[in-house]
Every structure is written in structure tokens, then in C-alpha cells.
Image (cartoon, rainbow, N blue to C red):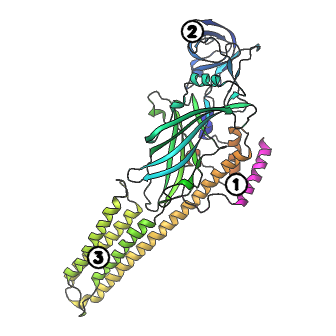
Amino acid sequence: MPATEEDEVGKPLSSWQSRVVKYEHAPGELIMTVETPLVEVNLFNTSRSLLIRGGPGGIWKIHQINTTGCVLTCIAKEGMTAYPWELAPSTFDGENFTVRQVQEDSQVIECAIVPPLIAYCRTTIFNVFEINTVSQTFRADVYFEVRFRYIASLYAPQTWVEDLLQAMNIAPDMIECLNTVSIDGDIQRWTMYLPSSQHRDRFMDLCYKIRFKGCFVEQFELQEFPFDQQTLNISLTINQPIKHVVFRSNDSYPSLFMANNFSLSNVFEVVTAEHVFAQVTLSNPKESSSGYVYNSINFSIALKRKPGFYVSNVMAPISILTYLGFLSFGIESQGTRMATSSRLAISVTLLLTMVAYKFATAGALPQISYLTTLDRFVTYTSFVMCVIAIENAVFPWWCSDDTCFDEEQIVLWVLFGIFTVGIVVGAIFIAMTMKARDKENAILLSQHHLRLLVAKEHPGKPHKVHSSLYSKLLTRMGLPSVPEACQQKGISNINNVGMPPSRVNEAKSHLSAIAAEIL
């Protein structure tokens, strides 16, 4: 099975470990002689910290390595010569190491490179109470939970875990949103230390929790405005590189959007219902002056704009005005053609009215360099009106008497047909585009539901097992394997957000068979 980006992030960046032959304390330092030499390549892109099991325990920063790589000089917190705790190997492959009491009776002292801590993230979006299309921002009330799962053995003191996080340079105030423009009021932060949500009788979890109201920036995709759908993203990160901490999506307790509280339901339709998509990403090392790579996790919901306002107040009136432009081909009561000045008065007046509509719609959009669907429609109708105005001025000059009446009638019906066909073709194109998007999003949403189904049916299994089950389940269900980085894109409206019961039962049947094969 090909590894996803999220799996690669969670891999330990160094597998070096060794037995400790001896150790001794020096002022402010710990000098260790190890069995397996440690060279700089083993420390590449790591926290440069050692965990020690037995002996002094705890976590120690590597200060110096001698030329043979077997004598290590380490430092710890000021005044510390030994820790009451140590980091035990992970009980579940790919999960956090566990803080426990030092095994003082251990005959063997071991050390290893400290792997990055793993944080499971989720959010609850209580409300989105403003979406400003012009400034491309939205305001929301959000809550985040960053959970360090299996971080300690049951009943281990919280101070031990805090010592570990301090040694890894991790603190609650380092967690922030990348796309926050401003924050309303104060940020509420609190920490909870409680029995693990997965194995309450064996481990403890540490949770950082944050809630605030803020303004977030979002680059809206407006090519299909006013038939557009928008994905609102909130990007959570921590100001530490992946050698210290990595993010994962908490599928066991998935993120939620309180859709019933959505105050803009008259303007937008929540097409993802209560679901929030989570996407773990890596930063570009070129964006860091030190070349570090940072984790972030994007939480997103999809909204579809209700186009009724623009259809009834802009598109329909402009269409009617364009059809009224064909009145300039009318004839006088005596059976003669209208005077050129009268014909131009009709067409130019209607054209100026349409220009006024164009300025009115421009105020509802940011200063973007591309044309929206509404822009293309207004441009098309304006072009037809310009052709009518030109015909009104040129045709009488080309044929000044009434003998060309039949030829002008042909021009009238040709222009009328071209305009009508253009409107019909545009409507069909929009309908086909939305239908294709619905089909694509049905696949994306099914993948999301299957991912949650795996976590629900096998709640106590580690992340690697969930990833394997999920990948095989997608194949059995006949769904494409979409890279994690693409799952938040292209989400749009579907009538039924959930999967049909028959597909859910089929997925459960396949999942049971897969679990029996690999567990």
C-alpha cells in the first residue's frame, strides 16, 4: 500500500538506539558512553534529544558528541540530575511513546532519539456569521482540540507530561491559526489531563483546547459566481517543526459544524451538513529561514451560494432589456421603418441601462482579473445590444428606402436566434457543470464517510491499522484513492450528504472481511 503524506509525517525520523555502557554526572551535564556510535547523520532533522530508559530517565538534549560517536555529553533542565519518569516504547505502532515511572530495577539502560510527538486534532465550528465576498474574509466562532493520545500511563502525574512537553519545546500558546486576520475578544485556552479516549484503563491523554471568535481570510474561487460554491478553510498549526510534533486528524471524534446555527442560510446552503473535512499538510522548507518543515491541518466546510437573488434581480432584467432592444426594428403606423434617431434612442438607452447593471454587480465582487459567469453573461448581452445599435445606425445608411424591409427582418431574426441560443447553451453548460461537480463530490463525501466508518467500527486500533483498512476498503468499494492533500477541494452540493444504507452495509461487510485478514 502506498504511504500517504500523513503517514510519512508520522514516521520517526531516526531509528538510532543504543545500550548505555556507563554514565556519570558533571556540573550541569550528563556524560554517557554508548554501545552503538551516534553520528551526525542520525540526528538529521530530529529534535537532537535523547530519551533514557532506566538510570537517570527523562529526556536530555545532546550537547556534544566525541569523535568516535560513543561518548555523548547531554544537558537537561537547570538543576536536574535525574527524572522520576521515562519514555516507554509505544504500545501501538506509530503512536506516541508513553511517560511512565522510571524502572529503577532495570539492569539495562537504553537510550534512543526522541521521536516527534503525535497530536490528534479536531474542531467544532459553532457558527459562521459573516462572509464578505469583496474582502474575501469570513467570521466564525471556532473551538479546537489538540490531543496527545497515549501520552502517559494511567495515573502518571500531569507534571511528568508537562516536563516532557517542555523538553520538546511545546506549549499551548504555540498553537495558532495561519489564516486569522483578527480575533474578537480574548482567546480561551485550557488544558485537560484525563484517561485516554481509546484505552481508559491503561493510558492518559493530554488535551490543549482553544476557543475564540475571529476573522479568517479565504481566497474565494468566483469563476462560477453566482452559481459558485466556496470552501471555507481554517488552518491550525503549531510553532514547532515536525521533528518535535506532527498533526493527525482525529477521526474517532470527528470535527463538526453546527449547521443549525448557520446565520447565513438565506444566502448560502451548507452542502457538507455537519461534516468538517480535515487535511494534514506540510509547509515548504523554503518558507523557513532555517529550512524547517512545519505541520498544519486545514479544517474546511463547503457552502453553495443560492443564486436566486442575482438571477431575479440581474440576469432576468438584463435578458428582458436585451429582448426589448429588438423593438428598435419596429415600424411606424404608416408601415415605414422608424427613423434612425428613434431606433438609436431605444438601443443606446437600453445599452446604458445595462452598463449601470454592470457597475452594480461589480460592487458585489472583489477586484479579480478573471470573468465570472455573471460577468460573461452581462458582457454577452451587452455585445448583442452593441450589435443591435450598430445595425440601427449602419443598415439605414446602406439601404435608405423601404425596399430592404425583408432583408432587415432576416437580420432581426438572426440576431434574435443567436441571442436566444446563447442563453440556452449557457444554461445547459451551467447545469452540466453542476451535475459533473455533484458526481465528483459524491465520491469525495463517500470517501469521508468510509474514513469515519473505519474509525467507528475499530475504535481501539492505531492509526496505521486505520490507514490500511481505509485504503483496502476504498478499493473494495470501487472508489478511487484520492491523496489526502486533494480531499478538501472540489466539494459542492449534493442532495444527500450521507451514503445510502445499502452502501453502508456493503462497506461494513467488506470492512469485517478486511479486518479478519490483517488483524
Q: Left or right: where does residue 318 sit relative to residue 195? A: left
Asked whether residue 503 is drawn in magenta, I would say yes
| Residue 28, disc | 2
Task: Tell me the SS state at disc 2.
Answer: loop
Residue closest to the far front: 185
Asked whether residue 411 is drawn in magenta, I would say no
Location of residue 31 (image quadrant): top right
Q: Which stretch appears magenta? A: 492-518
Instruction: Please state the horizontal and vertical placement of residue 398, each as a whole percent of the image.
Output: 21, 82
Q: Residue at x 61, y 30 (%)?
A: 117
| Residue 477, disc | 1
First of labels 2, 1 by sequence position = 2
Looking at the rendered structure, the kind of residue marked 2 is Gly
Instruction: Please state the horizontal and vertical placement of residue 448, each as a whole percent of the image.
Output: 63, 50
Q: Left or right: where does residue 424 sit relative to residue 452? A: left
Looking at the rendered structure, the kind of residue marked 1 is Met
CB within 8 Å, label 2 to label 3:
no
Q: Which residue is mark 3?
A: 388
Q: Is residue 400 visible?
A: yes
Residue closest to the far bottom: 334
Q: Left or right: where does residue 152 sit relative to residue 208? A: right
Mark 3 to mark 1 CA distance (whole Å): 56 Å
For disc 3, the neighbor class at 10 Å (few under 14, some 14 to 19, many from 20) is many
Task: Tell me the SS state at disc 3.
Answer: helix
- Depth check: give the residue in front, 45 or 496: 496
